[in-house]
Image (cartoon, rainbow, N blue to C red):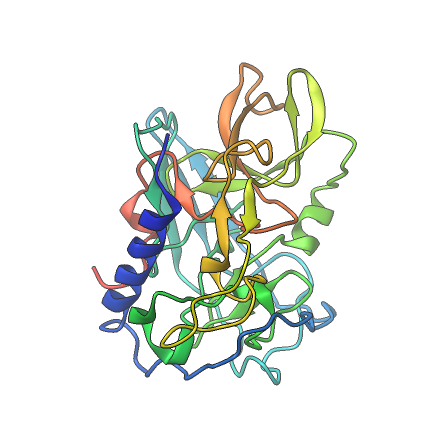
Amino acid sequence: MTKTVAVWSVAFALSAVAAIATAQHRFRYHDETETRPLRLQAATVDPGHSHSEISETRKSIRVSANGIPDHLVGRFPNQGNPHSISEQRVNLKVPTNPKSNRSTTPLEMGWNFGVSLNGVVFDPLAAEFWHGNPRSGWSYNALGGAVTLGFDENYAHVQPNGKYHYHGIPTGFIELLNYTPSRHSPLIGYAADGFPIYAMTGVLDGKVTQMESSYRLKSGNRPGGSAPDGKHDGTFNEDYAYVAGAGNLDECNGAFSISPEYPSGTYAYFLTESYPVVPRCFAGKPDNSFRFGRR
């Protein structure tokens, strides 16, 4: 599976342009060029009744849920996020036996990357751009801290329609699953192409291993002029480049791993502590049910 990061960036920009027709507001103007520490809302609030049902047939796995997490959340609305959590109609479908394509498919604006077992989706992209212009080629890294988005301690926040969603590692959820770095991660959820999602540890060559992203910050400075200036410090998604072999994961934050759910082994995605945290491309074909933008 090979696809250059340049192709990923172009696809992201083009999908953002298409998302304009879906958005009911203008993109916010931003000129921030430096990362800042995230200020996370303490997860002390009970979000209400959570419902998630997973059913499996020979051909597909279906997730039906109300989008309310089964763990404590931060206070919403808050200073960085003016929206309240509300129930959603989550009806998603993935193949039971997913297959990898010859090339990867970039995650685009208007698509969820995957869904957790509790029915809350992974939607890591943010509709925040340099000078508010999705055509600029510079999209803000949601976890870079330059733009305040009001995340809670689960690295989640709320969209205008009340959709609570994860941008990073869902801390409260993996605690409920008794995650520990000393063994293979429990199953977290499913990506839109059907491959499983795990947290930060897997089994490689028979050993429990910390899974590490192969993305690294680019050296030097951004171009400036009509583009942002300053160092490539992680403010923007485009500050990063995939460097094959720099970590033990591929460009989609995936690897072949043996897990309790897949004793014969499977390709799987991993959430990582470093960028991109949540994968930004698919090894297989994402199911259209994960698309929430313009259809």
Question: Front-most of 218 and 23?
Answer: 218
- Residue 233 visible within the image: yes
Question: Front-most of 161 and 54?
Answer: 161
- The quarter in which the C terminus is drawn is bottom left
Q: What residue appears at the point 66 percent right and 40 percent down from the top-left corner?
A: 200
Where residue 235 appears, as percent x and y from the top left, is: 54, 66
- Residue 66 visible within the image: no
Where residue 215 appears, as percent x and y from the top left, is: 54, 45
Q: What is the quadrant of residue 126 in the picture?
A: bottom left
- The quarter in which the N terminus is drawn is top left
Where residue 77 appears, as percent x and y from the top left, is: 58, 82
Question: Front-most of 204 and 157?
Answer: 204
Q: What residue appears at the point 43 percent right and 73 percent down from the top-left corner?
A: 224
**Left or right: 118 with respect to 28?**
right
**Residue 280 sits above or below residue 209 on the image:** below
Q: What residue appears at the point 66 percent right and 77 percent down from the top-left corner?
A: 75
